[in-house]
Every structure is written in structure tokens, then in C-alpha cells.
Image: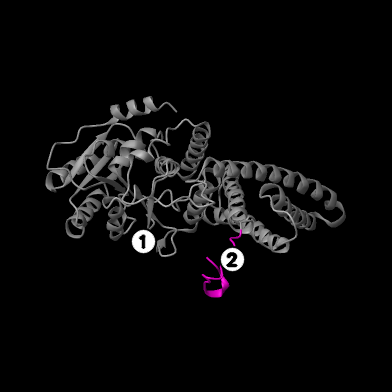
Amino acid sequence: MDTTTVRRTQAELRPELTAGASAPVLDLVIPVLDEAAGLERAVRTTRAFLDSQLPYSSRLTIADNASTDGTLEIAQRLAAELPGVRVLHLDERGRGRALHAAWLASDAQVFAYMDVDLSTDLSALLPLIAPLVSGHSHLAIGTRLSRTSRVVRGPSREVISRSYNLLLRGTLAARFSDAQCGFKAIRSDAAHALLPLVADTGWFFDTELLVLAERAGLRIHEVPVDWVDDPDSRVDIVATALADLRGIARVGRDLAAGRLPLAELRAHLPLVGDAPPPGPDDASHGTGDARGTLLRQLVRFAVVGVASTVAYGLLYLLLRGPIGAQAANVTALLLTAVANTTANRRVTFGISGRSRAATHQGQGLVVFGLAWALTSGSLALLAAVAPTAGHLTELAVLAVANLGATVLRFVLLRRWVFRPRRPADSSTPLPGGTVR
């Protein structure tokens, strides 16, 4: 990636905001595209909340990127009527492009954004930005995947969201829990350091920003949020998924090739207090050795997976005649699952000896069952949601589900089945015999 080109692009995109009062602590951006129906309610509700509940000075920026349905006119009327509301207009589409432009043009101390549908409860806004104002963290994100989050959404979006975050953990060693929740904040100094390096202008913008921040060693604060799915969402899930996969591949290549100047960022972004040192299994904040270990494990896992697939095919062909198709399928799957766990135990994760071998096999079968349920469940869900879907749609769903199942297996094998056991410390027992 050419960093100079990225900086020049951002300078060209940066629009001028109308001069006004002194710089606020918070600039909250609502990116919009053809949102004439719900914009006024969102702006009035949010501005009223900022005025009554937030102890910091704030600005609400409506970032309109190429709306054609009257959104811009409504935004301009609201800005003229409501103090503390501004409008920024871009002639090109892309949520990432809108946030790039709005944040780089702002003079606030903290930048944030939220979705116009108000899916996220606004009560989480103060916990989101307080760690940034105090200097405790560089970025903050809302997470719908915390145990204390209350989320209302359909099963398909739940599966897609969790699979995507598992994919990020397996491919880019991401440690943040929820990449795509539309509720995030960043300190201005961190934004000006990171945004010139973020190339995506669409939905992958959030993920790329967070991955680069983690790899630079910046501190990311997570806030559990209450979230209600918008039934009128017009996001093209298939197109977005494909764009995300391309983004993951691009960022992975850039990181592996060392094209991004991340090492220099941490020294220029101080915190109140020192950041905690990386843990022994911290692949995203840790040393190059940790990332190298993860890469080697991924390669070996892929090799074992290919070998297991070939073995399954051969066993199925050998057994189909004597015992029939269904029995041959189950037998071949079971045998290759056991062999796959054994191979990953020894080859991928370097565990030898008989200690906990039976436990590993049992856990491996559970992992296999979850992966199988994900692929089978995706087809069942498609049949329930779109019973007339064609073969190409089925193939696309299966491709995404199998990718998610593969990532799920790797993450569970690495984080659960073959996770290194910590030495017991009898001085700090926890209930149930667990030691921390």
C-alpha cells in the first residue's frame, strides 16, 4: 500500500465544515445514504440525548454521501434549526469514505459514529467515550457479543456476525469481539495517525481500522451494548461478505509484507499509565514470534485439512459398496474426524504423548459436530428464509458456511482443545478447582 497516495486521497476528500463555536470534546457522526424517512427522528433524538445526558460539549455531524432521496435537504434544515448540528456532503458513496472525511475534517478531541437507525441504545455512549476523554484508551467499540449485551436480531444475522468475527480471529489474529457494530469512537490523535493507512471506503473500514490499531499496539476499550436489529436494513449481505473477504486478504498481505508503518505509531500516542504487557498467547499485540507461530499453525492446519478431505473421499469410495452410501458417509466422517484431531494435535499444535489424548479426541468430536451443524444449519436456514432460492444461492451460502466452519474449527482447536495449560498455583484457587 502506498501511504503517500492514501494521504493525498484523504486530503482531496476533506470537505470544509462551516466555522462555528469552539472545538467540542465529542464529534458524533451519523453517516447516511438515502435515509430521508428516518433521519429527522434520529437527529432530534440523538441531539436531545447529547444535550441532556452527556457531560461533555458535543457536535452532531450528519455525513451524507451521495443521497438522492432528499436526505441532504432534510439534514440542512435540521442543521439550520438545531444548535450543535452540522452537515457534511460527499459526492461519492461509502460509509468508510464518509467517516474518513468527517473525522479528518473535525476539530474535536474524540470522534465517534453511530448508525442512523438507532439500533444501539444511546445509554452506552458515555461509557464508550469516557475512556478516550480520560486518556485510558485510544479507541472504543460497542460489542453485541458480550454476555451482558442484550441483542434482538434474526438467527441469520447472528450466525453471520459470529462467523465473521471468528474468521477475523483465525486469519488476522484479531482480539476485539465485534468488528461491525455501528457504534465506535476514536481519539483524534489516533485517528489522524491511523486513517491515512486505512484504504477501505466501504463496510470493511471498521475492521481495517481496528486490525491496524491492534497491530500498532493501541488500546481498544469494549462496551457491551443493547442492540435491536433494523428490519428495514438494505445492506447487500452477499456483496458485503465478498468485499470483507477481499479486505481481509489485502490487509493480511500488507501486514505480512511489512508495508504498513505501524511500529512508529505507538510511540506518538501516549496513554495515562502504561499499557499492559502482551500475554504469552497474544498474537495481535505480541511479538513477531507469536505472529509467526500463528502463521505456521494456519499453514499446517490447512495441510491437515486437505489430507483429511482426500482420506474421507477414499474411505467413502471404499465403503460405499459394502455398507451403502449413508453408512459409508458417517463412517468416513467419523474416522477422518478422529484422524484429523490426532494430526492437528501432533503436527499443527506440537503436542505429543498420551496425556489428555482421550480428552482431546472427545473435544475434537464436539468441534467437528459444531462445524457440521453450522454447514447443515445454513442450508436449513436458507430453506426457511428463501425456499425458492436457486442453486447458485445455495452454493454461495455453503461456501460462506464452510469457510466459517473451517475458521470455527481452527479457533476452537487453538483456543480450547489444544490451548496450553497454565501451571497450577495452589495459592490462588478459584471455585470449582480452577486456578488463575
Which labelled disc corresponds to residue 292? none
Magenta region: 421-436
Residue that label 1 marks: 226
Residue 74 lies in magenta, yes or no?
Answer: no
Residue 92 placement (x, y as % from top left): 32, 32
- Can residue 231 be spotted in the picture? no
Q: Which residue does the image show at 29% across and 28% down from the upper left? A: 11
Q: Residue furthest toward the front? A: 427
Name the amino acid type tagged 1: Asp
Against 142, is 209 above or below?
Answer: above
Q: Residue furthest toward the bottom? A: 432
Residue 434 lies in magenta, yes or no?
Answer: yes
Question: Quadrant of the image for the N terminus?
Answer: top left
Residue 67 placement (x, y as % from top left): 29, 38
Name the amino acid type tagged 2: Ala
Q: Horizontal placement of 6 versus 83: left or right? A: right
Local secondary structure at mark 1: loop
Q: Which residue does the image show at 77% across and 55% down from the upper left? A: 335
Against 46, is 191 above or below?
Answer: above
Q: Residues within 10 Å of mark 1 (few under 14, many from 20)?
A: many
Camera-nearest label, 2 or 1: 2
Residue that label 2 marks: 424
Q: Horizontal placement of 60 versus 121: left or right? A: left
Q: Which residue does the image show at 76% across and 54% down from the upper left? A: 329
Whichever of labels 2 and 1 marks the residue nearer the N terminus, that label is: 1
Residue in the foreground of this view, choosing between 193 and 103: 193
Q: Horizontal placement of 315 versus 343: left or right? A: right
Label 2 – label 1 distance at C-alpha? 37 Å
